[in-house]
Image (cartoon, rainbow, N blue to C red):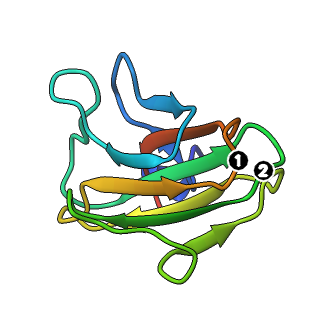
Amino acid sequence: MGQGFYHSPFNHINSSSPGFNTTSSGIFALESTGVREWQYPTNRVVRFASLGTDDAYIKFGTSDVTIGSTVGMLYLGGTVEIYRMLTPSITHIAIKSSTADFTANVVLGEGNP
């Protein structure tokens, strides 16, 4: 018997572009109308992964989210990817790295990590 959709910890959203890469620090919208949108109001998950070994701070919130070394979660570069369940009120991710060559991948999904 097959598992249901939400038994898997992470499934990409049904989209032509479920994720994006960033090569700089900043605040980024998670959704992009018409390109990257969650289809359901619950079970929203974001997968975050560094594409190098540089550390960064990340924080989820709205368009005015602030990030710094004392406000945010430290992500150790080169670590396995992390998953975060989100409520519909969370619309943005803030990323701050002390290195200029930091690259991260952010992917929208659904499930129960």
Q: In the rendered image of this protein, does residue 76 appear above or below residue 10?
A: below
Residue 98 lies in what quarter of the image?
bottom right
Instruction: Out of 75 and 34, give the one closest to the viewer.
Output: 75
Residue depicted at x 81% and y 56%: 79
- Which secondary structure, mark 2? loop
Q: Inspect the image, locate mark 2, and give the three-letter code of the amino acid beneath it.
A: Asp
Marks 1 & 2, CB-CB < 8 Å contact? yes
Q: Which residue is mark 1?
A: 99
The quarter of the rendered structure image containing the C terminus is bottom right
Instruction: Out of 16 and 76, give the one closest to the viewer.
Output: 76
The answer to whether residue 113 shows anywhere in this view is: no
Residue 100 lies in what quarter of the image?
top right
Q: Position of residue 56 (x, y in %)?
A: 65, 59
Q: In the rendered image of this protein, does residue 81 appear above or below residue 106?
A: below
Residue depicted at x 38% and y 35%: 13
Q: In the rendered image of this protein, does residue 24 appear above or below residue 113?
A: above
Residue count near mark 2 (Cα–Cα under 10 Å), binned few <14, some 14–19, many ≥20: some
Residue depicted at x 55% and y 50%: 47
Q: Position of residue 103 (x, y in %)?
A: 65, 36
Identify the disc placed on residue 54.
Answer: 2
The answer to whether residue 35 shows anywhere in this view is: yes
- Which secondary structure, mark 1? loop
- Give the spatial CA distance, label 1 vs label 2: 7 Å
Q: Inspect the image, locate mark 1, and give the three-letter code of the amino acid beneath it.
A: Thr
Identify the disc placed on residue 43.
Answer: none
Residue 14 lies in what quarter of the image?
top left
